[in-house]
Image (spheres, rainbow, N blue to C red):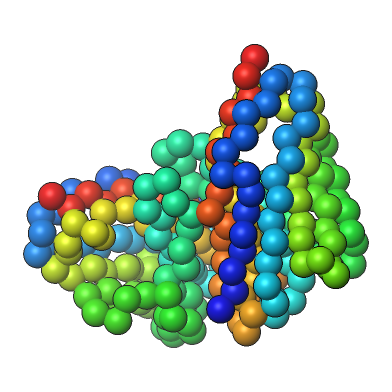
Amino acid sequence: QQQVKQSPQSLIVQKGGISIINCAYENTAFDYFPWYQQFPGKGPALLIAIRPDVSEKKEGRFTISFNKSAKQFSLHIMDSQPGDSATYFCAAPSRTSGSRLTFGEGTQLTVNP
Amino acid sequence: NAGVMQNPRHLVRRRGQEARLRCSPMKGHSHVYWYRQLPEEGLKFMVYLQKENIIDESGMPKERFSAEFPKEGPSILRIQQVVRGDSAAYFCASSPGLATETQYFGPGTRLLVL
């Protein structure tokens, strides 16, 4: 069964700093790794996702780095802002089926002004 | 362009009652997923459905829980004889295709069992 280990569990950074969240996965049916952002009382919203043909994807201040050999991927938030304070989840497809995503346990990010 | 809709947003039930959670996927999406989120925890997959078919229910408890996605109307997650441990946020997501496609989440139904 797929497991996704996410770290750290919580993260506090100062405004303007870099937030880094890491995830490690086991085997997957295919390479598709999304990151979701969730604010309190809301549903998760897709933030950014990476597919197998690239090792890095950047969208604005958000960057995913993907290391296939190490089975790891990470989210970098540059110039972190207080509005980025939320819980972030990484996810990976299951080992045997593309029909389900396994989520990490989440990282609660707090960006202090 | 409405997103995934879930209702009710909050549901309070007493132990032993039934809970029915509804999910309307985004327009054009025929794949629906249900997840459960316990307080301070991540999202756990429960079931994946396409119209009139359950494709993968490996994450759903064998007893008391059932799900359907009829040809017409929303997907329904049904919990019979609820217990306190069922208290959680239940999220529905939809996608136009397989998990290679982005899953879009609804706002969730927060179930509280007294």
Q: Position of residue A93 (x, y in %)?
A: 64, 71
- Please tell me in which quadrant of the rendered image residue B80 appears: bottom left
- Please tell me in which quadrant of the rendered image residue A5 appears: bottom right
Q: Residue at x 47, y 68 (%)?
A: B45
Residue B96 visible from this viewpoint: no
Split into 4 quadrants, where in the image is the N terminus of chain A? Answer: bottom right
Residue B43 visible from this viewpoint: yes
Q: Position of residue A34 (x, y in %)?
A: 69, 57
Q: Residue at x 53, y 64 (%)?
A: B94
Split into 4 quadrants, where in the image is the C terminus of chain A? Answer: top right
Q: Residue at x 38, y 66 (%)?
A: B74
Q: Position of residue B55 (x, y in %)?
A: 49, 84
Left/right placement of residue B85 relative to residue A52 reads: left
Q: Residue at x 60, y 51 (%)?
A: A89
- Please tell me in which quadrant of the rendered image residue A32 appears: bottom right
Q: Position of residue A6 (x, y in %)?
A: 62, 54
Left/right placement of residue B7 relative to residue A87 reads: left
Left/right placement of residue B10 relative to residue B81 reads: right
Q: Nearer the viewer, residue A9 or B75?
A: A9
Tally of numbered tags: 0
Q: Nearer the viewer, residue A70 or B104?
A: A70
